[in-house]
Image: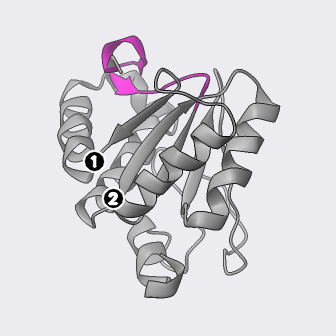
Amino acid sequence: MDFDEHQSFGVFKPVGHVVVLFPNQELAAKGVRELAEIGLGRDDVHYLSDRQMVEQIDRDLADASALASLGQEVNLARAQRDLAQRGYHWLVVRARNDGRAAQIADCLKPIGAERAQHYGRFIIEELIEHADDLVQVAESSERGLNAQTPSGKEGERANRRGPDER
């Protein structure tokens, strides 16, 4: 995947894709196999390891323009970096429409996907909800991304799940 083609003000924003987070490499690999079962091939699914994501996000944050902080892209990148440092792996999956994006999330949630974020031109929609998620509150560049956890930090989400849920 060419990250340069999927940028918004210097930050990774893969419009028309679903970015799926898994707590480990094994579950991400299983996700690739599950997506093949619903007809998505190598050109549609891109795997990124935890190390690759930390490196990419560090480059993005170093290159981000001031305009990137107006939306949630920078806050989302910081939250994703936190999870990458905790060992999370990513699949970036092409979704030609909202229905396909929902199908991708529905396919991957039962096998352990923690997050599935559909990147639209103007909004980034979270497609996976968990029973213990808190009600989301307003997000801003100052407040940051609301992870729907008591502290508001994405890392707390990873700590709340037991090994059998990862």
- Visual colour scheme: one colour
Identify the residue position indicated by label 1 in the image.
49
Residue 96 visible, this orientation? yes
Choose between 163 and 140: the one closer to the eye: 163
Quadrant holding the N terminus: top left
- Report x, y in % for residue 50: 26, 52
- Report x, y in % for residue 113: 55, 60
Choose between 138 and 165: the one closer to the eye: 165
> Where residue 25 is drawn, which disc sits there?
2
Distance from disc 1 to disc 2, alpha carbons, whole Å, reads: 7 Å
Does the magenta-highlighted stretch encompass residue 76? no
Choose between 133 and 1: the one closer to the eye: 1
- Report x, y in % for residue 122: 65, 25
Q: Mark 1 against mark 2, which lies toward the viewer?
A: 2
- Report x, y in % for residue 57: 26, 39
Q: How many neighbours does mark 2 have within 10 angstroms: few (below 14), some (14-19), or many (20 or more)?
A: some
Vertical comparison of 139 with 77: above or below = below
Q: Bounds of the magenta span?
A: 3-17
Reading the chain from its start, which is encountered first: label 1 or label 2? 2
